[in-house]
Image (tube, rainbow, N blue to C red):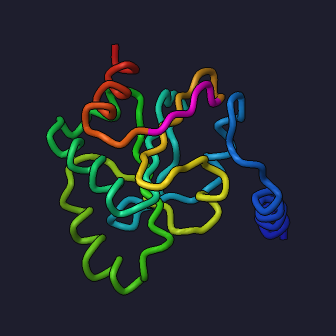
Amino acid sequence: MNKFLAALTMGIALLNADSLKIDSPLKMLESFRYETPAGRQIKIPQKIELVIVAFEKDTGALVNEYLDTQSPFYLQKSNSIFIADINKMPTVIANMFALPKLQKYKHLIYLHYGEKLQAVVPNKEQKVTLLYIEDSKIKEISFISTHKELKMAIEKRYR
């Protein structure tokens, strides 16, 4: 019963949640459910400094193409994660084509299937959202659209 009440409370909080902004707590992102392409549930690490979020197929491909040229632990070493919101993708397409392709990547991908993430995380069409984290709070939000910008954003945290 307590688990039900906790889930209900979390659901109501998410429905009434504001969008992320500067100084929003990282807990807002931690409350969502994420999975690996293999279907394993995954949580956002404690000491994260950069969250990369893609909401469209093309922006997700941009991030995956860049990360595929790096070492498998490039994101972890830079205290970064990549979230791909695939809630708009039809389940049949996701299961037959997208997930098998995503499983082949050597880097870690956090998949989100629900609609709420896009309502909470600021996003722009054809742009990747970057959330810079400091002391478990959002300190900067920016949007990028090239491999070069992505590399600069990740390596800015990596130094």
Quarter residue 75 falls in: top left
In the rendering, at what x and y percent does residue 154 appear?
Answer: 35, 28
Give the side of residue 116 with respect to residue 143, left or right: right
Please check the rendered image and state whether residue 13 is part of the magenta-colored stretch, yes or no: no
The residue depicted at 57 percent of the width and 59 percent of the height is 33
Q: Is residue 94 above or below residue 34?
A: below
Q: Is residue 80 above or below residue 102?
A: above
In the rendering, at what x and y percent does residue 157 appear?
Answer: 40, 20
Q: Residue furthest front?
A: 125
The residue depicted at 47 percent of the width and 39 percent of the height is 143
Please check the rendered image and state whether residue 139 is part of the magenta-colored stretch, yes or no: yes
Q: Residue furthest left?
A: 69
In the rendering, at what x and y percent does residue 101 appear?
Answer: 21, 67
Image: magenta residue range: 138-143
Labels in figure, total: 0
Q: Quadrant of the C terminus?
A: top left
The residue depicted at 63 percent of the width and 30 percent of the height is 138
The residue depicted at 78 percent of the width and 63 percent of the height is 15
Q: Nearer the viewer, residue 43 or 99?
A: 99
Give the side of residue 104 with respect to residue 153, left or right: left
Quarter residue 23 falls in: top right
Most prominent secondary structure in the magenta stretch? strand
Q: Nearer the viewer, residue 56 or 100?
A: 56
In the rendering, at what x and y percent does residue 155 appear?
Answer: 32, 22
Quarter residue 98 falls in: bottom left
Give the side of residue 8 with respect to residue 31, left or right: right
